[in-house]
Amino acid sequence: MKPFLSLSLSLFSALSLLTVSAHAQAASQSDRQMIAHAHWLSAEQARPATSSDTATLKAVPDPTKTAGQYHDLCGTRVTPKILPLDVGGTLGTLTAVIEEDPACFGGDGARYTLLDRTHHVVWQNSAAAIAILESRHDGVHDLSFGGPGPKTPVWSWSAARHAYQLRVVIDTE
């Protein structure tokens, strides 16, 4: 009876792996479709920061302000831009602070810093654009940040960490 039990467990393990693999492919396909149909936002849709955004800009680790001008981490003078992002759930609307400087941020062209309503940084990195995806984690929409190349990351909200964390990188080709 033990050989039969061993064969049954091996067969069960193989079927489990196939099911998990099929589920992963379906999830990957779903993410790929969401990214393909996403509405991408960039600095073009943002507004230039004004004096009323001073508290918001102070919460961003970069840029620095000297002599009334903002400078990014490469020391280039920039005009930060503000873009509201409604991600739903307990976060509601985030504020994206965008610093455009292709010389500093490479092919992505800009640095995005996302702040919650208390001005806590929940995500920061370089990107060319951002999309709010249909999928949700902990009640908050997932985000994707676009840049050059065929790989697109999907970031999910972690309520425990109070930050977005990388969930998966999708090959969009």
Image (cartoon, helix red, strand yellow):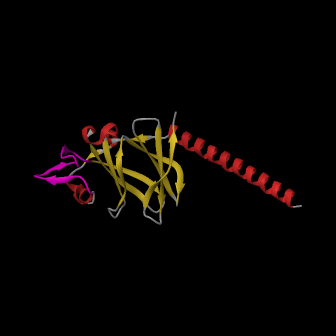
Residue 23 image position (x, y, % from top left): 66, 48
Image quarter of the N terminus: bottom right
Which stretch is magenta? 61-80
Q: In this view, does 95 lie to the left or right of 90?
A: left
Q: Camera-side residue: 56 or 24?
A: 24
Q: Which residue lies furthest to the right in this view?
A: 1
Q: Residue furthest left?
A: 67
Please tell me which residue is depicted at 67% across the width and 50% down the height of the picture.
Answer: 20
Residue 39 image position (x, y, % from top left): 45, 40
Query: Most prominent secondary structure in the magenta stretch?
Result: loop
Please tell me which residue is depicted at 36% across the width and 40% down the height of the picture.
Answer: 128
Q: Is residue 14 left or right of residue 101?
A: right
Q: As displayed, is residue 153 above or below residue 62?
A: above
Tally of numbered discs: 0
Q: In which quarter of the image is residue 6?
A: bottom right
Q: Residue furthest front?
A: 3
Q: Which residue lies furthest to the top in this view?
A: 173
Residue 26 image position (x, y, % from top left): 63, 44
Residue 11 on the magenta span: no
Please tell me which residue is depicted at 10% across the width and 52% down the height of the picture.
Answer: 67
Residue 98 image position (x, y, % from top left): 30, 47
Please tell me which residue is depicted at 52% across the width and 38% down the height of the picture.
Answer: 171
Residue 72 on the magenta span: yes
Q: In this view, does 169 lie to the left or right of 52?
A: right
